[in-house]
Image (spheres, helix red, strand yellow):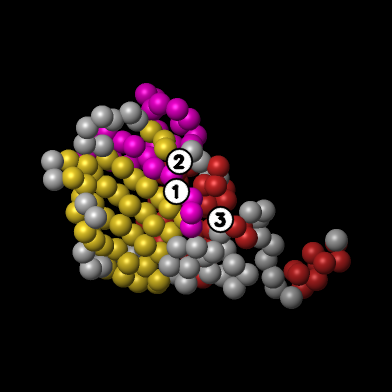
Amino acid sequence: MKLMHGAALAIGLTMQPAGMDRFLTTTGQLTARLDLRDEQQGFVGSTGEVLTIEPSGTWRLARFVNERVEPPHDRGRIPKEGLEALARALVRRRFAELSRRLGRRVEVNAHLVTLSFGDRDTTLVLDPGEPLGPASADAPGSRQAWDDFVGIVETVRGLVKTP
């Protein structure tokens, strides 16, 4: 085992943390599409934005009202180093282990932030108009899970450069 590790270092390969292969291919692409949907429920239904990152790193940002998604108003590309940072955040923040639903119990006009990767998704439920941020002292459920979710979303948003 030491010989193989040394050989990998000798030819310049980096060792990937356990679980990275679930999110990143050996060629540096994501293993699935990632969608980040930030939605506010209200009188007209649901409105917000959806950010889509394709496995290649190309991304697009579009507004939506209910099921009608407008053409993207911004787009770009995340380099391979950014995709690796995203995969590391998904592993470190335990995305695969997060509950499907986190956050508050809101009956009307919830603010929903949903992160989907492949066939897995998690939604953080916030009060109407509540900004996404670290779990407050009164946050229901696991504050660590809430903070892990927010950490992943912040990583995603940090990789996408928008005006």
Identity, as a three-letter code, of the amino acid under mark 3:
Arg
SS for tag 2?
A: loop
**From this viewpoint, which residue is outermost toward the top?**
138
Which class describes the residues within 10 Å of circle 2: few (<14), some (14-19), or many (20+)?
some
- Residue 79 is left or right of residue 13, and the answer is left
Which portion, as a residue range, is magenta?
Answer: 118-146
Identity, as a three-letter code, of the amino acid under mark 1:
Asp
Identity, as a three-letter code, of the amino acid under mark 2:
Arg
| Disc assigned to residue 147 | none
Front residue of 131 and 41: 41
Quadrant assignment, res 45: top left
Reading the chain from its start, which is encountered first: label 2 or label 1?
A: 2
The residue at which mark 1 appears reads as 121
Q: CA distance from mark 2 to mark 3?
A: 20 Å
Q: Are marks 3 and 1 in contact (CB under 8 Å)?
A: no
| Disc assigned to residue 88 | 3
SS for tag 3?
A: helix
The residue at which mark 2 appears reads as 100
SS for tag 1?
A: strand
The location of residue 56, given as percent across then percent down, is: 47, 72
Residue at 55% from the left image edge and 47% from the top image edge: 96
Q: Are marks 2 and 3 in contact (CB under 8 Å)?
A: no
